[in-house]
Image (cartoon, grey):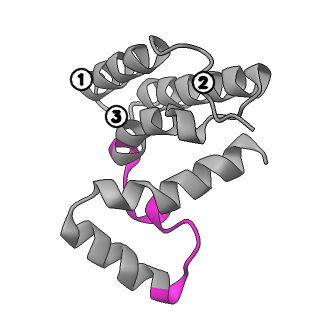
Amino acid sequence: MYIDKRLRRYLESDVPGRLCGECNALIAAERQFNPYDVVARLFDARVLLANLPGFLMPDHLPADALPRRTQFEVVRGLGRMLAEDDLVCEGDYRAFEAALARVVQRPPNRGRRR
């Protein structure tokens, strides 16, 4: 499965569990009208940036090294783009970089095994 599809699935399935109760109520209401890409439609770039490192957790990484490396680069590049386009503040971007650094320190073979 392509990274963009997996990222969208991650945003829709995992991110709501990290948001407040009011946010989840809003998500549930919005899904009644259009169930697709709700998190991407409702929340700003700060929410996306804050949750991107979670997409690099072992259960979201491909087993093979090349797609795993590509996923890291896509996440890092997306975060950089949000910062360069001034969609997030410098402090949020620094927190994102720190979270990525913590994820990168994990052993490289922590992806899902088949």
Residue labelled with disc 3: 88
Left or right: 33 with respect to 101? right
Which stretch is magenta? 32-46
Instruction: Give the structural element (helix, strand or loop) at label 3.
Output: loop
Assess whether mark 3 and mark 2 are in contact (beta carbons under 8 angstroms): no
Q: Residue at x 51, y 39 (%)?
A: 55
Task: Provide the residue designation for mark 2.
Answer: 72
Query: Which residue type does callout 1 highlight?
Result: Gly
Q: Label 2 amino acid?
A: Phe
| Identity of the residue drawn at 75% across and 38% down | 114
Q: Residues within 10 Å of mark 2 (few under 14, many from 20)?
A: many
Magenta span contains residue 44 = yes
Q: Mark 1 — residue?
A: 91
**Contact check, label 3 and label 1, Cβ < 8 Å:** no
> Which numbered disc, 2 or 1, marks the residue that appears first in the sequence?
2
- Within the magenta stretch, is there residue 51? no
Say which of 37 and 105 sits in front: 105
